[in-house]
Structures are given as structure tokens and as C-alpha cells.
Amino acid sequence: MTAFDLSERRIWDGRAEAYARTFARLCAHPVPRLLDAAGVGPGVRVLDVGCGSGTVTVAAAGRGAVVRAVDAEPGMVEATRRATPGVDVQLGSLPELPYAGGEFDATVANFVLNHVGRPAAALAELRRITRPGGRVAVTIWRVPGAAGQALIGRAAQAAGLTRPQWLATVDAEHEFPRTQDGLGALMSEAGFDDVRTEVLAWDHYVGAEDWWAGPAAGVAAIGRLVNSRGPEGVAAAKREYDVLCAEFAEEGGELALPHVALLAQGSV
């Protein structure tokens, strides 16, 4: 594993329940379009890679697909098992998954490439386990992101918090532009045919305290940044956050947070 992969293991260790209560709802937005892009329907053998708390697995099973799932974090594996009793959910990580070549009709990975140190190798693995003629669909967060994606980071910066040294970044030789063209090129380089990419933009509606709960609980890299200076740092960032929230506040009291992601699909 790369240093980034090891960093990701540390970030997500023990965070499955906190993720399910917070950021999982945000990440659920693209799921119907992701499954459509992969052609997931009745009887389709589909693998949900990086299943998290089970949102995609549940949705695919609801379509009548024959679903299996895999995640690198044991807590996420258990959460998906609880959400989908009877579904085969295994522990495994990209770019080496515990499945035979061509085992699936479709493979999906919702915001998973953001969390691997070798994105090209990860895509090649998704292609390997998908049968000829099958489809693969993935989502990632676009860079630059939208204003809602930057809210917590702005609060942390205003509070003087700095990124912990152990939070690694993807090595330069494995990085790619997190843009529509960049993701499409990476899919093509991994050997996919009929590659199509699109931008997904939406406002995520959430209560201010609910949105803060994820980072405060240490969820994701942003959560580790918020907690980098202990309780005093968390409190300082929260004060800044409360001020910045006014930019996104709706009349009903919720925040309307703009987000933007990328969806790519290709055939094997």
C-alpha cells in the first residue's frame, strides 16, 4: 500500500457508525444515476466496491440485482451486512479484490477513487473483475469543488488549524486531474470502451448541527483536520463555522450546500 492508503486506513478506522449518521446521506445523492450508468437491474450480478454503510448495496438489491459488496474498513463491512441481511459482504481493498476475473456483470464504486493511492490500478482492477460486455461506473468529487464542499475547511482555516503531518496525499506519479476530462482519460487509459463522463451538481440540504456532527466526530480527512488540535481546536473551528453558515442558511433553518461530483462509465 502507498502512504496515502495507510493514511486512509487510519482516517476511517472505527468511523463507520459516525459516517452512516452524517456524510452517508450526502454520498447517497448520485446512487440512482450510478446504478443506471452500470445497467443495474433485475438479475444483474453487481459488485458494490467500497460499500461504506450500504447505501448502494441496498439500492441495487431493491432493483432486483444479485448484489455482493466489499470494503476495506471492517466497520463498514459490518454496517452493510446489517443493512442488507443475506448479501455477501467481504473485507477487501483496491487494487486487489478477492474476486475472479469477469465475475460480475456490473461493478460500481461510489466516491471510492477519492480514497485510493493508485487510482489507475484501482480502475484496472474494476475492469478485471467485470465480464466482457459488462459495465463499470464510478463517482468522485470534482476538484475544484463547490462552495458547500469548502465550508468546513474554511472554518478550520479561520481557526488556525493545520493539516496533520500523517495525513498523506496521493503520490504525484499516481495523481490525475479530478475533472471531467481527467477522469474520462483515466478510464480510457485503464482500457474501458465507450467511456462517458458527466458532472453532477446539487444542493445538499442539512441542518447546521447535523453537518457539523461528521467532522466533529472525526469523519473523513476533514474530520481529522478539525480534531487536529484537540477539543480547543474543535471549539474554535465551530465558532468560525457558526458564522460562515449564514452564507448557506435557508428560511426554514437548513443549510443549502452546493456540491459537485463526477460520474464516469465505461464498458469492458
Image (cartoon, rainbow, N blue to C red):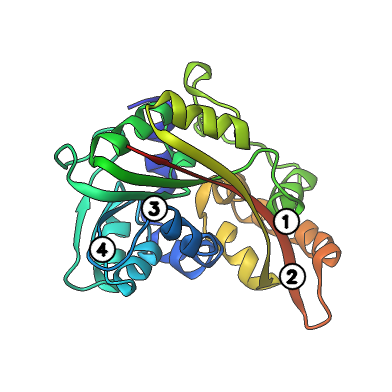
261 or 226: nearer the viewer: 261
Which of the numbered marks, if any, corresponds to residue 13?
A: none
Q: Amino acid at mark 4?
A: Glu
- Left or right of 159: which side holds 226? left
Q: Which mark is residue 255?
A: 2
Name the element at disc 1: helix
Label drawn at residue 38: 3
Q: In this view of the protein, which residue sits in the foreground, 186 or 22?
A: 186
Badge nearest the viewer, 1 or 3: 3
Provide the secondary structure element on which disc 2 rests: strand
Circles 1 and 4: CB atoms closer than 8 Å: no
Residue sitting at x 55%, y 42%: 197
Q: Say which element carries label 3.
A: loop
Q: Residues within 10 Å of mark 2 (few under 14, many from 20)?
A: many
Q: Is residue 126 left or right of residue 90?
A: right
Q: Is residue 120 visible?
A: yes
Dots 1, 3 in contact, CB < 8 A: no
| N-term mark: 2 or 4 | 4
In the image, residue 227 above or below residue 56: above
- The residue that mark 4 highlights is 78
In this view, the mark in front (1 or 4)? 1
* Residue 78 percent coordinates (x, y): 25, 63
Going 67% across and 37% down the picture, which residue do you hit? Answer: 162
Work out how far the residue at label 3 is from the one at label 4, CA to CA, in angstroms: 25 Å
- Coordinates of residue 153 in the picture (x, y in percent): 70, 47
Give the foreground label among 3 and 2: 3
Mark 2 and mark 4: span between their CA atoms?
Answer: 31 Å
Name the amino acid, label 1.
Gly
Q: Are dots 1 and 2 in contact, CB under 8 Å?
A: yes
Q: Earlier in the sequence, mark 1 or mark 4?
A: 4
- Residue under numbered circle 1: 148
Q: Earlier in the sequence, mark 1 or mark 2?
A: 1
